[in-house]
Image: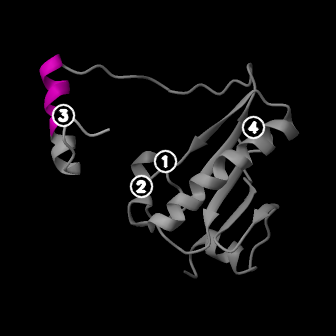
Amino acid sequence: MKDCVFCRILAGELPCDRVYEDDWLLAFLDIAPLNEGHTLLIPKEHHTSVTTLPPAYAARLMQMAPRLGAALMRVTKGDGFNLMLSNGACAGQVVPHVHLHVIPRHPDDGIVLPARSVAYASDAARATLRDAVRRRLEVTADAP
């Protein structure tokens, strides 16, 4: 995709600070980090949504994410890390190419997650939503 900044990085048209690369993935430092070491992990194939990302790519992302997070924690002397994936513009996805943010964390780093929480209108509303999602996923109440 010639208009995708991440595809242009993958093609070597734009620079990045690569921290990891294999046949499937590329990880590089974010140019607008929330914390020192904030890294983006992207599939080498262009996919705009995690909902259409092939399962093998999704699995590879999640195999690499904890390894990358642990490395970032050690290097930055962090106490933890966040994995953040925004899917769609209203969720905060700025670049339309699937990417996982791996953000090293420190106790007093000033990042506040979650921003807020919401309450269900009632127990019945929560149950209705739960049941609708189960039906959509074709999952029974007995399934793990």
Q: Main secondary structure of the magenta part?
A: helix
Residue 132 position in % (x across, y down): 15, 40
Say whether residue 130 is magenta: yes
Residue 134 position in % (x across, y down): 20, 42
Please name the amino acid that badge 1 sits on.
Gly
Label 4 – label 1 distance at C-alpha: 18 Å
Q: Nearer the viewer, mark 1 or mark 3?
A: 3
Residues drawn in magenta: 123-131
Q: Using the image as rendered, state which of residue 107 and residue 116 is in the foreground.
A: 107
The answer, for residue 135, to whether it is visible in the render is yes
Q: Using the image as rendered, state which of residue 64 and residue 32 is in the foreground.
A: 64
Q: Upstream in the sequence, badge 3 or badge 4?
A: 4
Say whether residue 8 is magenta: no
Residue that carries the numbered disc 1 in the rendered image: 92
The relative height of residue 36 versus residue 137 in the rendered view (above or below) is above
Q: Upstream in the sequence, badge 3 or badge 2?
A: 2
Label 2 – label 4 distance at C-alpha: 23 Å
Q: Upstream in the sequence, badge 2 or badge 4?
A: 4
Residue 109 position in % (x across, y down): 74, 25
Q: Secondary structure at mark 3?
A: helix
Q: Which mark is residue 129?
A: 3
Q: Kindly identify the residue that appears in the image at 42 percent across and 55 percent down.
A: 88
Q: Which mark is residue 20?
A: none
Which part of the image, by quadrant, shows the N terminus? bottom right
Q: Secondary structure at mark 4?
A: loop
The relative height of residue 19 versus residue 111 in the rendered view (above or below) is below
Please name the amino acid that badge 3 sits on.
Leu
Please name the amino acid that badge 4 sits on.
Asn
| Position of residue 37 in the picture relative to residue 118 (left or right) | right
Q: Are marks 1 and 2 in contact (CB under 8 Å)?
A: no
Q: Which mark is residue 88?
A: 2
Residue that carries the numbered disc 4 in the rendered image: 35
